[in-house]
Amino acid sequence: MSTEKRQEQKKRLHSRNRNLDMYDLEALVLVSPQLANHITPNKYGEDSVDFANPVAVKLLNKALLHRYYGIENWEFPDENLCPPIPGRADYIHYMADLLAENNFGTIPKGKMVNCLDIGVGANCIYPIIGVTEYDWDFIGSDIDSKSIETAKNIVSVNGSLRDKVDCRLQLNSKDYFYGIIGKEDKIDLAICNPPFHASPEEAAKGTRRKVQNLTGEHKRAPELNFAGLSSELICEGGEHKFIHNMIKESSKFAKNFLWFSTLVSKKSNLKGIYTSLENLDANRIKTIPVGTGNKSSRIVAWSFLSKVEQKDWRESRWVKK
């Protein structure tokens, strides 16, 4: 594949994504010198990070967050999910565009926007990007107490995140909004990156496929380059059941949120998602294609508010008095 072709794949990222261009490896090594140990020629003969190596991926992410987002302290256990930064940034940018649709094309910024990240994880990545790009406030929930403590530490040691991110432990693993959102709370946006897999076997199969795509090698027990605890990658019923349960519970909080949203990795799940939303009388449903490199995915967003209620939401929350 030519450099031009790979550049074209990069351009599938959102136009405001700070990772839109090819990685400036020299600049990234300056902020993370250890990264130099993991840069080798790829199959095209060009310098590249070894994306099949979890240590290399984590160092790359630290360098990206330092250089582009001002995050100098991003530490979490190696067993936790280490997310690909460009794709996570795309989710935030597309959600900013979605909120702009309710604000005459202008992205609402600052403390006037409050977001809920369902499954914030130890890496706290969505709040980091949302705070840096748009100065939004975040609530980050998670069912894993260690992940919440780690995310809290990331917030506390990075000045830009303090007083902007509130990490909350979800005590009931079957709940999404109950126990986190109060009856009177108003949240502009819910985001979610659900567990993909229904079983450890399915997760292992996905790992083998990913490593083979990256390296061309078939390994029976490869090390996942982005890691991840079982609760981050696996849930009963997989992505399908997780999202359907989230949709069902979201209807109980219809007036608390302007928009709900989730990533949907499997295209085959879309039909059932649309049916569930229509059965629960969602007023607006949007599907936003996203993709990085060869991977295609989509965001599904929905709102139960009428046009009048959405107008009132904007005027009561986003219009300066």
Image (cartoon, grey):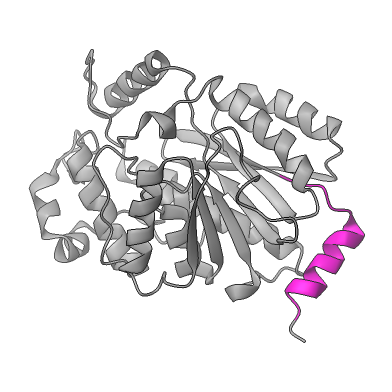
Instruction: Give, as a single range, the part of the protein colored magenta.
Output: 302-319
Specify whether 80 is left or right of 59: right
Query: In the current view of this chain or complex, which residue is farthest to the left?
Result: 37
* Residue 267 seen in the figure: no
Quarter in which the C terminus is drawn: bottom right
Pinpoint residue 153: horizontal percent, then vertical percent.
33, 60
Q: Quadrant of residue 301?
A: top right
Q: Quadrant of residue 226?
A: top left
Pinpoint residue 79: horizontal percent, then vertical percent.
27, 37
| Residue 223, placed above or below residue 259 | above
* Residue 234 seen in the figure: yes
Residue 209 vs residue 315, the one in the foreground: 315
Residue occupying image coordinates x 59% and y 29%? 242
Q: Is residue 20 magenta?
A: no
Residue 320 vs residue 171, the one in the foreground: 171
Pinpoint residue 148: horizontal percent, then vertical percent.
40, 50
Magenta segment's dominant SS is helix
